Image: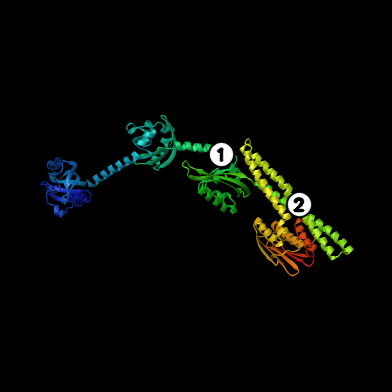
Amino acid sequence: MLFHMDLDILSNLYDAIIVVNLGMQIIFWGPGAERIYGFTAAEICNCPISDIIPRHINDPAKIQALYQAMEDDRVWRGEICSMHQRGDLMDVMASVNALTNARGERESILLVVRDMTDHRRIEASLRVSEDRFRAIQEVSLDGTTIVRTLRDADGTIIDFTCTYLNPVAERLVGQSLALAQGRRMTEVFPGVVESGLLARYCAVATSGKPQIFEQHYTADGINAWYRNMVVPLGDGLAIIFSDITAQKQNEAQIAFQASMLNAVRQPVIATDLTGVIYYWNQGAEDLYGWTSAEACGRNAIGMLVAEPDQAQARAIVMGMHQNNTGEIREYLVHHRDGTPLSVLFNSSSILDTEGTLIGFVGVATDITQRKRMEQELQESRDTLEQRVEVRTYQLKQANVALQAEIAERTWSEQAREQLIQKIVTAQEEERRHIARELHDQISQDLTALLLGFKILQGDSDIDERIVADIAQLQGMAAQISDEVRHLAVQLRPSVLDEVGLAQALIFYVEQWSAWTDTAVDFHLSGLEGTRLPLVVETTLYRIVQEALSNVRKHAQASEVSVIIGRRANEVRLIVEDDGVGFAMPISPESTESTTRMGLISMRERAELIGGSLTIETAPGSGTTIFANIPLSITKG
């Protein structure tokens, strides 16, 4: 009963459990045997054991040893060749033991058989994997070292034993696999302790977590930087490393170059092809307010360039992509705190050793002060215009006195017209005189200044930095010259004398719109191909000129409308804007501010030739100027 209970337990094992009697016939066939050999218990029981273990197959010496052990009542274990139901031979591990009854007499023989086919397949696969691993390591660009953990009696890691070095590792550390294999790491690589590598390896082996790090190693004539990837591998480590000494030297060289650029106080910025900043020197920090850590990684155009100039900046960068050329442009940028800055940006392409475009570098020059000077020049020009207005007002006062004298002497209407003509002519002669002074004297002086700058530029003994400053001053002088010519035209345009009021107004309105970037809706009727009396043309031109000047300086308008038309006996002019408007003074003659001077001047011009001028305005409602000039009072 006990025998059968034991067999029931053994039959549940994965291995084949077979019992044969002393006559070598099978009397028990477990489920594992059915799985391994393919026979059922009904098919194989009472059959000789030689049906599955023939005596004369592969390696008969081992088969004979098996049968001899069964006959002699000996324990035996070994690998033999066995036969499947299909007739296929298979490798098995067999063990032989005797089974006795309650009296201790040998009653039967127990065979335990394990199929070794999968085991052999796994061994072969491991050999292939190992061969592949070694083949990969033979051509790898990185060094690979495999070590086994060495522990003390308490289980603490004290060292590692080298088991493998690939050819790259042998070359990088100057040790051969034959000399290193089986030896302690601290003996083969004495620098691992002082460099801190051994401590890092122990930490990986203890935590079981891989690490990637860079480490400087100095020992046995080696002075190098390595990038290490340490991976737990069973009871050991796989250490994959590469020599990054050249990279570290390049980084040091780059750091040295960066320190040199930082010593140059001029702002220097470098970006990749997409405009992302990767270099930002101290000069850039000083100018823009962002630190290098804050600026690097951000897009230069989006961070620095003011919104109106961003589209143009991107277009310039695209052009540099295509042509690999530099650009010198003026940009409106902003400081970190929002303060606007004007800079002259000299950008150049960065090429690699093969001439491929890899990025851009730019050097900025702060021209905010120069722009401020230009603004001051504009203010000076406005002051000059105010002087002309004041002089016109003074002439008006003289005209009042003359009119009083005319009233006293009862001059005729013709005398009055002649007097008006003289006053207007005097005003225009004064403007013509000032314009001639600007053109002849100041323009000549500026031309001489430009020639002087050109001569200085040709002097080879002048420092390059001074040459650059001369070029900047030369540009400013040229701009001042253009503005002086523009002011001279404003004072007395020759086109009014040459082609008449209609063409003069068309030309002036187009110029004003382009100069101020303000849309103007201009309508002209009844004046095409005709000329009005000179005094009328001059008065209407000056009113339009003064009205648009006020729009530019005070209205903040986005649209302006100018309408001028001739009727039977008069010319009607309307100038309207959508600007901020203003509160009209209580008295039309109020001179509380220079803003009113222009309004007074326009009204007086109209009244001098018998016309009228009215103004409609209110804060926030824009401004409209109406002027009516009669034609019956003058005949040319």
Q: Residue at the spot x=87%, y=64% of the render?
A: 411
Q: Which of the two marks, 1 or 2, is nearer to us in this view? A: 2
Residue furthest bottom in the image = 568
| On screen, residue 222 above or below 471 | above
> In the picture, residue 402 is in which quadrant?
bottom right
Which is more toward the observer, 98 or 210? 210
Q: Image check: 175 left or right of 449?
A: left
Q: Do residues under tags 1 and 2 come within 8 Å of each other at their CB atoms?
A: no
Work out whether residue 351 can be spotted: yes
Residue named by callout 1:
261
Q: Image check: 243 left or right of 372?
A: left
Which is more toward the observer, 201 or 214? 214
Which image quarter holds the C terminus?
bottom right
> In the picture, residue 61 is in which quadrant?
top left
> In the picture, residue 560 is in which quadrant?
bottom right
Q: Position of residue 120 (x, y in %)?
A: 24, 44
Classify mark 1: helix, strand or loop: helix
Residue named by callout 2:
434
Which disc is residue 594 wearing? Answer: none
Q: Position of residue 509 (x, y in %)?
A: 68, 59
Q: CA distance from mark 1 to mark 2?
A: 52 Å
Which three-letter amino acid code belongs to the residue tagged 1?
Answer: Leu
Disc on the earlier residue, 1 or 2? 1
Classify mark 2: helix, strand or loop: helix
Q: Position of residue 76 (x, y in %)?
A: 17, 41
Residue furthest right in the image = 409
Which three-letter amino acid code belongs to the residue tagged 2?
Answer: Ile
| On screen, residue 626 above or below 87 | below
